[in-house]
Image (cartoon, grey):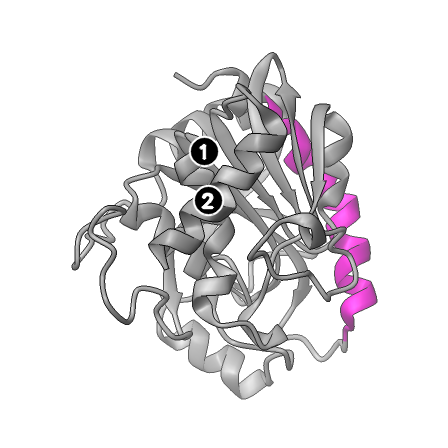
Amino acid sequence: MLEEIKKTAAFIRSQIGDFKPEAGIILGTGLGGFADRIEAEYTIDYKDIPGFPVSTVQGHAGRMIFGKVEGRSVVAMQGRFHFYEGYAMKQVTLPVRVMGLLGIRYLFVSNASGGINTSFRVGDLMIITDHINLMPNPLIGPNIEELGPRFPDMHNCYDKELIAEATRIAEQEGIKLQYGVYVGGTGPTFETQAEYRYFKAIGGDAAGMSTVPEVIVARHMSIPVFGVSVITNCGLSDEVGDHEDVQLQGRKAGVRMEKLFCEMIKKLK
């Protein structure tokens, strides 16, 4: 597995030369518009990267973009991979490990999610403060010692300093934020109301089908993580949504998320 990761990283390095990203960004469903904020220097389609899966979900463009945001070097994944697409966890998390080998010092993740907390409204931005994992753990199997320890600590898996910085920026820019715990499930079915009630009972504020595996492997590599969920539907209501609704609400809220990410990236240490 380590050789596969190194081979993929080496191929990308052959395409981008001396470009070294400081931050990696994973753009979830409907949130690919952030790519327009990047002064792109290199763009690589997933299908052209050895060992990479191909994103099969509508709203995921399927490419890596290397360039500048607010003068800082970044790599953005315009579309991610999901366990429900039939990929193994090592495939779902491969891009994060590759970005780690390429030198990222921070990981920014975003997703579209269903609101559990009844104070949330469609279109809210929720800063992820913690997560509950209901998917297979991506670290199951032989540990890759070169990447991290056998038993990584998940305390502060969403970096408190980055959350505090996001709060300061949001106050300055007039961006309303919610805060909460993200529940990661397998999908691809949207959750039943009974499942939403269960998630609420165990401490969840929003639910989705991604993000958690990526965060786990990032923390395994000691990469600080900042995460945002766009609330695209309210799971405990009687309203029925679909994937098109999720993409639409993601695009609407994406403008505020883009502003937040840009300001945070500009101020990275």
Give the number of marks: 2
- Return the residue at label 2: 98
The answer to which quarter of the image holds residue 39 is top right
Q: Residues within 10 Å of mark 1 (few under 14, many from 20)?
A: many
Label number found at residue 102: 1
Residue at the image point whose x is 30% and y is 64% from the top? 139
Residue at the image point whose x is 52% and y is 76% from the top? 186
Name the one closer to the observer, 188 or 159: 188
Residue type beneath disc 1: Leu
Cα separation, mark 1 vs mark 2, equals: 6 Å
Q: Is residue 50 above or below residue 162?
A: below
Residue at the image point whose x is 42% and y is 61% from the top? 213
The residue furthest top is: 71
Quadrant (top left, top right, bottom left, bottom right) of the C terminus: top left
Q: Secondary structure at mark 1?
A: helix
| Residue 260 in view (yes/no) | no
Q: Secondary structure at mark 2?
A: helix
